[in-house]
């Protein structure tokens, strides 16, 4: 069985670059945001969320409008908690099932901004935390279509849950070029493959 690595960090810190490089070098990447998007399409989830937050979160086809939902939950801690109660269990089940199957043949990377908060960290053999200076994160956020106020709003709702104490943690500082971060990602994944990363 191969290692399961948890990748985390604050919004717009460079996780996607790290994850892309890891995938290019043989890791099986589970993007938890994408898992969440799939969960939001499930009929039972749609019904529960519309009952909780109102029909205003639905798009013209009756699905969840993520932008409208995000506008509610990122501005209200109680609303965010309700959302998590509904979607996190289904998301975690999907992640664990996929990770267990993929780990038979590949190193697995679980890319999750709120890794510890979702209790996904408990299933990891190693955790990577990406950190970047605020000014660089603002630039990364703009590439995602967010302005600085949107980044501040998302950052404010970012949970600071502790990681399990028995799991090795590698902190990678993303304060230079994208190439430098790619190099760090490649070195880490190759080290995990060959047992030199501890």
Image: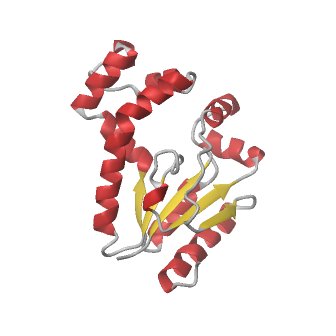
Say which quadrant the N terminus sits in: bottom left
Q: Residue furthest left?
A: 43
Q: Nearer the viewer, residue 174 or 39?
A: 39
- From the top left corner, tell me how far across and down residue 78 is, in percent: 51, 23
- Horizontal arrangement in the rendering, residue 132 relative to residue 97 (left or right): right
Residue 124 seen in this snapshot: yes
Above or below, comparing residue 87 to residue 162 in the picture:
above
Q: Residue at x 40, y 33 (%)?
A: 85
Judge whether 182 appears above or below 52 on screen. Answer: below
Q: Nearer the viewer, residue 1 or 59?
A: 1
Q: Position of residue 102 (x, y in %)?
A: 32, 67
Relative placement, left or right, of 37 versus 194 is left
Q: Is residue 31 above or below residue 62?
A: below
Q: Which residue is rendered at x = 45% and y = 53% of the image?
A: 120
Residue 59, visible in the rendered structure? no
Q: Quadrant of residue 164?
A: bottom right
Count all numbered tags in the image, as a single digit.
0
**Image location (x, y in percent) of residue 89:** 35, 41
Which is nearer the eye, 175 or 122?
122
Q: Is residue 104 left or right of residue 9?
A: left
Q: Quadrant of residue 168?
A: bottom right
* Protein image colouring: secondary structure
Q: Quadrant of the C terminus?
A: bottom right
Depth order, front residue of 102/150: 102
Residue depicted at x 29% and y 30%: 45
Name the residue at the front extreme: 165
């Amino acid at each position: 069985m191969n290692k399961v690595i948890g990748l985390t960090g604050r919004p717009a810190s460079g996780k996607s670059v790290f994850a892309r490089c890891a995938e290019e070098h043989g890791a099986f990447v589970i993007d938890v945001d994408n898992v969440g998007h799939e969960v939001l399409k499930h009929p039972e989830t749609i019904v529960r969320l519309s009952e909780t937050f109102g029909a205003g979160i639905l798009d013209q086809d009756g699905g969840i409008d993520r932008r409208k939902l995000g506008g509610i939950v990122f501005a209200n801690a109680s609303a965010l908690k309700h959302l998590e109660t509904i979607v996190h269990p289904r998301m975690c089940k999907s992640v664990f099932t996929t990770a267990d199957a993929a780990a038979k043949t590949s190193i697995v990377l679980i890319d999750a901004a709120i890794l510890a908060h979702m209790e996904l960290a408990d299933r990891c053999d190693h955790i990577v935390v990406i950190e970047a200076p605020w000014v660089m994160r603002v630039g990364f956020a703009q590439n995602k279509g967010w302005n600085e106020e949107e980044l501040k709003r998302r950052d404010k709702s970012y949970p600071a849950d502790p990681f399990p104490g028995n799991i090795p943690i590698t902190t990678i500082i993303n304060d230079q070029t994208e190439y430098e971060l790619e190099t760090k990602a490649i070195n880490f994944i190759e080290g995990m493959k060959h047992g030199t990363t501890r």
